[in-house]
Amino acid sequence: MQEALNSLHQEATTELETVTSSDALREWELKYLGKQGAVTKLMRGVGGLPSEERAAFGKRANEVKTALAESYSARETVIKAQELARDLSQGQIDITLAGRPLSVGGLHPSTQTLRRYREIWAEMGFQVFRSREVEDDDTNFTLLNMPPHHPARDMQDTFYTTTPNVILRTHTSPGQIRSMRALGADGTQPIRVILPGMCYRFEQITTRSEIQFHQVEGVAVGRGIRMTDLKGTIAEFARRMYGDNAQVRFRASYFPFTEPSIEVDVECFLCEGSGCRVCKYAGWLEIAGAGMMHPVVLRNGGYDPSVWSGFAFGMGPERVTMLMHDIQDIRYFWGNDLRFLEQF
Ligand code: DAH
């Protein structure tokens, strides 16, 4: 029995020297020191020994067990160190590798259209005037010739605030009043501005209408400005925006702040007028409401309407962007879904 112990000690020690990985080390431990291991099994045989030999065997067996356990942990330390060193050298960062490309942001499709609008109007001599999104009821409606209870107010469902008279603007037209007052020098200077910005309406959200949307308002006030100036200006804008062959047509309409009022269509830039799904087979797309500024509005802006005249227009860039990119649902614009935004 003593000999069996000694040779087991010998065997286990020799084998341990060949162990080079954590996995193999674990196997070695099971094989010799585990509950089913060789040393344990041998120790169980102590009962079969003559009683005078038992004590010596037990003592020797414990010595062997302790010695093997010490060898085991010494080996474990070496292997752990080796494996760590290997992981570190293999896991090293290769600084010669090309870096991961940074994903570059893109411009929102509305921003792209707005920038194009601004560029064109700037070339045509219109400066940008920034007007406020939080408006007062007077400027949004009353000063634009829509007194309280005027039926035209129903055309634009309004977001009211808890502060009386403070609302979110329903259109960019109140900027007409603000720009005339800010730049007209008490009705003595001509002005030519566009007013781009966000508008808000308390509307049912559908594929075609949102509670927020951009408008680009335009205002030109001067002496002797006539309807033909408006028509020529809009036609020139359409040529620059939609191409040299862009045809426009003007339809009579009604807005409280213009007289006369018109709506402007451009020949469908997708089918060139022959009729398609986008223009609903009409051949024309509506791009603006416009008109000659109402005398009441001019007066509210500080001008004497018997001397000064002007035109105004309002355009909706989201509509145009939808048509240009065949976007079926206006809700994508403010949904912040990258799968949509990344396409532009
Ligand atoms: N403010 C109008 C709307 O939101 C659009 C509009 C029509 C603006 C005619 C104008 C205009 O300046 O002359 O429906």
Image (tube, rainbow, N blue to C red):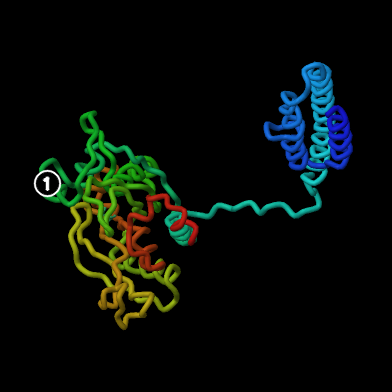
Left or right: 32 in relation to 293:
right
Of all residues, the one furthest to the bottom in this rendering is 274
Left or right: 312 in relation to 142:
right
Q: Position of residue 95 (x, y in %)?
A: 80, 48
Q: Nearer the viewer, residue 93 or 146?
A: 93
Residue 73 in the image: above or below residue 18: above
Left or right: 5 in relation to 119:
right
Q: Nearer the viewer, residue 22 or 12?
A: 12
Q: How many marks?
A: 1
Q: Quadrant of the N terminus?
A: top right
Q: Position of residue 12 (x, y in %)?
A: 84, 36
Kindly identify the residue that appears in the image at 47 percent across and 60 percent down: 116
Of all residues, the one furthest to the front in this rendering is 50
Asked if residue 207 can be seen in this view, the reply is: yes
Q: Nearer the viewer, residue 34 or 257?
A: 34
Can you tell which quarter of the image residue 83 is in? top right
Kindly identify the residue that appears in the image at 80 percent across and 32 percent down: 76
Q: Which residue is mark 1?
A: 150
Q: Position of residue 270 (x, y in %)?
A: 38, 76
Asked if residue 220 can be seen in this view, the reply is: no
Residue 251 in the image: above or below residue 302: below
Kindly identify the residue that appears in the image at 38 percent across and 75 percent down: 269
Q: Quadrant of ligand 1?
A: bottom left
Q: Nearer the viewer, residue 71 or 36?
A: 36
Q: Position of residue 64 (x, y in %)?
A: 83, 25
